[in-house]
């Protein structure tokens, strides 16, 4: 999709925003108004499906590994999940998933340590002053999200898994761009809320029915840095049914 077509699409989306249409409905409506083509729709859906598949799967995998190794945190998550399940007769709903603040903090901390998208690139539209350096326009800049998430200037003891880093009082004074699992600004991930719901639903169900015990440990983990952060070898967790 070229820049002119994308601009027209954004203007159209602003006009229909109040209707609260789903993504595909928005794209079809834009097509009917001759704002985009069939190919444009396919590209947008391909992007949404790709970004929401492998990224979320890796987020779940790393979160489970961390919970398996930290039994005290896992037990606290289970207590929260079990309480929510009792209130909702064992059902997971969109509303009930919002009642899991500690699990959400655990997921955020897991994505800090192991962000699925560990590197993003941008082309500068104008000169940028960075301390004593000037980075000229049209430069391709790589943003090392993995490195930012482990910067001790923002994260004391950065290699420690500590969900309480994301308590409200801890978050409010933190630099807004020191945590970027879904990027930031106008190009941030359009599916981040959906991804959090997916991860919550999967992990809440697993923790409710199983104890997690480590088989492979994160200290032995070798990471493969493709477009998505992957373990370079199989990783195993033991699931012990809760009777």
Image: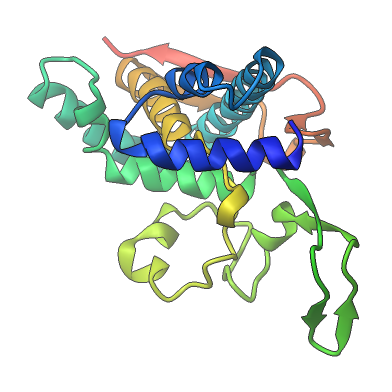
Up/down of 195 relative to 31, above or below: below
Residue 186 locus on image (x, y percent): 58, 53
46 horizontally vs 169: left or right: right
Up/down of 11 relative to 226, above or below: below
Residue farthest toward the front in the current orientation of the protein? 34
Looking at the image, which residue is at 48% across and 47% down?
Answer: 108
The colour scheme used to paint the residues is rainbow
Residue farthest toward the bottom in the current orientation of the protein? 132
Query: Dividing the image into 4 quarters, which one contains the C terminus?
Result: top left
188 horizontally vs 129: left or right: left
Looking at the image, which residue is at 71% across and 41% down?
Answer: 4
Query: Dividing the image into 4 quarters, which one contains the N terminus?
Result: top right
Up/down of 137 relative to 88, above or below: below
Residue 110 locus on image (x, y percent): 54, 44
Residue 57 locus on image (x, y percent): 59, 23
Q: How many numbered circles are shown? A: 0
Q: Is residue 123 among the parts visible in the rendering?
A: yes
Q: Nearer the viewer, residue 181 or 128?
A: 128
Residue 40 locus on image (x, y percent): 68, 22
Looking at the image, which residue is at 66% across and 13% down?
Answer: 38
Q: Is residue 183 among the parts visible in the rendering?
A: no
Looking at the image, which residue is at 77% across and 57% down?
Answer: 143
234 horizontally vs 161: left or right: right
Up/down of 233 relative to 168, above or below: above
45 horizontally vs 195: left or right: right
């Amino acid at each position: 999709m070229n820049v002119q077509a994308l601009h027209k699409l954004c203007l159209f989306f602003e006009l229909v925003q109040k209707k609260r249409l789903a993504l595909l409905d928005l794209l079809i409506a834009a097509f009917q108004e001759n704002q985009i083509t069939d190919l444009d729709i396919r590209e947008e859906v391909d992007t949404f499906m790709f970004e929401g598949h492998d990224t979320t799967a890796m987020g779940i995998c790393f979160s489970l590994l961390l919970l398996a190794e930290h039994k005290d945190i896992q037990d606290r998550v289970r207590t929260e999940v079990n309480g929510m399940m009792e209130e909702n007769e064992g059902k997971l709903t969109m509303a009930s998933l919002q009642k899991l603040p500690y699990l959400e903090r655990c997921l955020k901390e897991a994505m800090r340590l192991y962000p699925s998208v560990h590197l993003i690139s941008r082309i500068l539209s104008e000169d940028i002053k960075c301390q004593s350096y000037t980075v000229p326009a049209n430069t391709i800049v790589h943003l090392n999200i993995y490195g930012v998430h482990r910067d001790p200037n923002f994260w004391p003891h950065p290699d420690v898994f500590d969900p309480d880093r994301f308590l409200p009082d801890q978050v409010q004074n933190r630099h807004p761009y020191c945590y970027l699992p879904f990027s930031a600004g106008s190009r941030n991930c359009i599916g981040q809320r959906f991804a959090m719901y997916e991860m919550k639903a999967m992990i809440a169900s697993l923790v409710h029915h199983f104890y997690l015990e480590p088989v492979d440990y994160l200290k032995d983990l070798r990471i493969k840095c493709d477009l998505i952060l992957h373990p370079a070898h199989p990783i195993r967790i033991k699931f012990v049914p809760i009777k």
